[in-house]
């Protein structure tokens, strides 16, 4: 009996310790409605009113207030910034490189050509001839796995 109980207890401890390592904000993301970032961006208008959970590797975090994180998409070279009001959630710099899940909605901000090229100039990119659309994901809950 002891020989059977020991492995079961070890597995239970491992499962609970993994859950404890995740950092949760507002109860954690809703894992039942995970939508790939590429799907969310290709159907942007739908997700401005419909809640979704996205998953991605954290590539950048706001260094001043921890009010945003940038997640790598499932599609190569595509990212999405998640943004909260300052102080609502504070994302740690240590989140970089970790997997994050965020539940919320998408905000779509069309930019003028001038705004687009100002942003590109600030990023040391060449100007373009067509305006871009800025997508921001506004989460209500987030989980960052450790």
Image: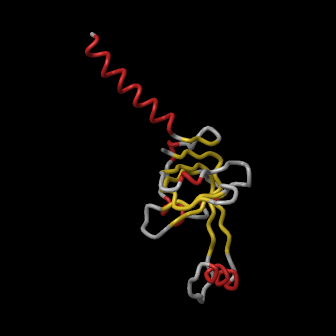
Residue plotted at (65% across, 67% down): 108
Give whichever of 139, 123 is nearer the camera.
123
Q: How is the image coloured?
A: secondary structure
User: Which of 132 and 146 lies nearest the eye of the viewer?
Assistant: 146
Which residue is pictured at 51% across the width and 43% down the height?
Answer: 31
- In the foreground, 65 or 27: 65
Residue shown at 56% from the left, 87% from the top:
126
Q: Is residue 59 above or below residue 121?
A: above
**Depth check, front residue: 143 or 110:** 143
State the quadrant of the N terminus.
top left
Residue 41 image-quadrant placement: bottom right
Q: Position of residue 33 (x, y in %)?
A: 51, 46
Residue 65 point in image, percent of width and height: 70, 56
**Most distant residue in the top direction:** 1
Residue 21 rendering spot, x and y as whole percentages: 50, 38
The reply to whether residue 47 is in sight is no
Q: Quadrant of residue 10?
A: top left
Count of number-bearing discs:
0
Estimate the x, y position of residue 134 in percent, counting from the top left: 63, 71
Q: Is residue 61 visible?
A: yes
């Amino acid at each position: 009996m002891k020989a059977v109980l020991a492995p079961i207890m070890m597995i239970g401890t491992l499962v609970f310790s993994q859950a404890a390592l995740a950092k949760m904000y507002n109860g954690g993301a809703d894992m039942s409605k995970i939508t790939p970032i590429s799907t969310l961006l290709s159907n942007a208008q739908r997700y401005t009113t419909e809640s979704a959970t996205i998953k991605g590797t954290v590539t950048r975090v706001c260094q001043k207030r921890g009010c945003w994180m940038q997640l790598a998409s499932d599609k190569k070279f595509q990212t999405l910034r998640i943004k909260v009001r300052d102080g609502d959630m504070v994302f740690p710099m240590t989140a970089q490189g970790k997997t994050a899940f965020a539940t919320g909605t998408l905000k779509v901000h069309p930019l003028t050509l001038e705004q687009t090229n100002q942003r590109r100039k600030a990023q040391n990119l060449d100007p373009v001839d067509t305006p871009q659309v800025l997508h921001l994901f506004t989460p209500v809950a987030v989980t960052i796995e450790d």
